[in-house]
Image: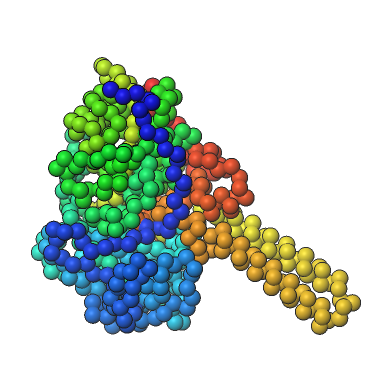
Amino acid sequence: MINSKMRIKSPMLPLVVSVFLLFYPFPAASGTDSKAVVLTCGASNTGKDADGREWSPDAEYFTSSISASSAASSQDPSLPSEVPYMTARTFMSDATYSLPAIADQRYWIRLHFYPATYGSLNPNDAYLDVIADGVQLLKNFSVTQTSKALTQAYIVKEYSLAPPASASLINITFTPSMNGSYAFVNGIELIPFPNLFRSFGKMIGVPDEKIDVNTSSFETVHRLNVGGRYIAPAIDPASRTWYDDTPYLYGENVGVTTNSSGRIDYDGMPESIAPVDVYSTARSMGYDYNLNLMYNLTWQFQVDVNFNYLLRLHFCDYQARGVNQIVFDIFVNGELAEAGVDIIGWTNKSSVPVYKDYVIFVKENSRNDEHITLALHPATDADEQPEFFDALLNGLEIFKMDDPMRNLAGPNPRPSNMLLRAEAKEAARAGQAMARFSAAEDGIHVMGGAAGGAAFGAMAVICMTAYIKKRKVQGVDGSTAAGSLPISGLSQSDGSKSSHSTSTSHLSLVAQGFCRQERTDSFAEISLADNHDMNHGRELEDNDGSAEIFSQIGNPTGR
């Protein structure tokens, strides 16, 4: 038996500001005889990144009739290292990379993009399609547009294909999307890992239906160490990166974080499922059990519509000592995913990890609020009330699953309304400043044309330099990582570049993904909003319909 005084309290971890799905993978975990392929595209020699990993030239792996190796014209200060981002392979026609692989092996495929000027090519003209072993990864993808929408200098996309049955090669083909466009890539990684997808996912909203996830291909959308810190791939047995969950919490009440000082006992579960650091921390609802009955512990993610998504929830209860002490319900998009979750009931003892897979189809709707919302609430409908009204979660992974056409591509994102308003505001301020200087110039003609012109020119340069520096500091032009979140952050999409058969909105990482809507309170957007109060869950001046979603799930079972 435990009581509230026995719970380990820890302060809310600060928001981890990071770029979209930045990974630093290491060689594959033991147990595979396949080697990692890590390529710096367009480079003529091997090079090492900031972590000391060695990247090889790509020349021996690809075939193309029209390609060129180019150096980036400038280096953004937010790039983690020159390798692989300061060189690129550009393509004016189809180009295919053939990478060695073995049958029945799962791989991470990571694509690195840095939207700079390469030779005489304009980065705004880069639109590309990418197909890997018949799976459409990207369609009409604009790195420049994505980078601007996410206020990030570079983009990393992560995928995992269904294990090949017999192939000895994985082919990745890059194609310019339209006449006048070109394709490019800065880095490619093919990383083998133990197959983590041998389970069946419970289909939410369809009773008794399960999805065989082993036969699916995925795009990583989010990977979160809930209640914990950033986890680098060096610590992860499957070379993954885990991010803080704070940016995705929704509501005034965001619970408390706890940590275990004891040993985590995997009890036969493969340690490759998730590192021990994921199961050693958690987010629970808090210590006021009456308050816990009045709210849901909720996370919100914007995603592409008309896809299935695999949600993998990681649990480890290291505080309860028996069954029926902490029992809760899980809701996804307002639908009951699992009732009466008792972690100790699943594991039979404390400090033993367990995970559960759920699949949900996110369909297009008229409210333009294509989200996945995950909510936990104490169970109150059981015949025997649990000892504590609480709920907890240790880790969360969200993967987009390929559709029946083997497509994973989503539309290009567009900047959020907040970002567009901020840019317009800054431009207006700059225009007003120039007008004032112009008026001042008119008033000082008595100083002589040359002297007056020089003075005005100097002031104009100072003004514009200050404006540009301000934009860079605030992350408006995407040149710094100061306001970046792991993609898929929260986004809105440009329907004009949609690649799906029906109108969709958003992209994804690790990564993903995964553009943020106006409710996202990253540091950059707080500064852009002139420090308006933007606490999680506080309504802003948007009409995206999100409030309606949460009013519907706020009391999902009528309590």
Q: In which quarter of the image is residue 232?
A: bottom left
Which residue is at a point 27% across and 54% down the rendered structure image?
A: 236
In-front residue for pair 482/172: 482
**On-image quarter of the N terminus:** top left
Which residue is at a point 70% across and 64% down the rendered structure image?
A: 431
Colour convention? rainbow
The answer to whether residue 506 is seen in the rendering is no
Which residue is at a point 34% across and 31% down the rendered structure image?
A: 391
Q: How many marks?
A: 0
Q: In this view, does 132 lie to the left or right of 187?
A: left
Q: Name above or below for residue 6 compared with residue 242.
A: above
Q: Quadrant of residue 156?
A: bottom left
At which x and y percent is residue 118?
43, 78
Which residue is at a point 35% across and 47% down the rendered structure image?
A: 224
At which x and y percent is residue 318?
28, 34
Q: Name above or below for residue 243 compared with residue 53.
A: above
Q: Name above or below for residue 53 compared with residue 44.
A: above
**On-image quarter of the C terminus:** top left
At which x and y percent is residue 283?
37, 37
Q: Quadrant of residue 261?
A: top left
The answer to whether residue 263 is seen in the rendering is yes
At which x and y percent is residue 84?
36, 72
Residue at the far left in the pictured view: 166
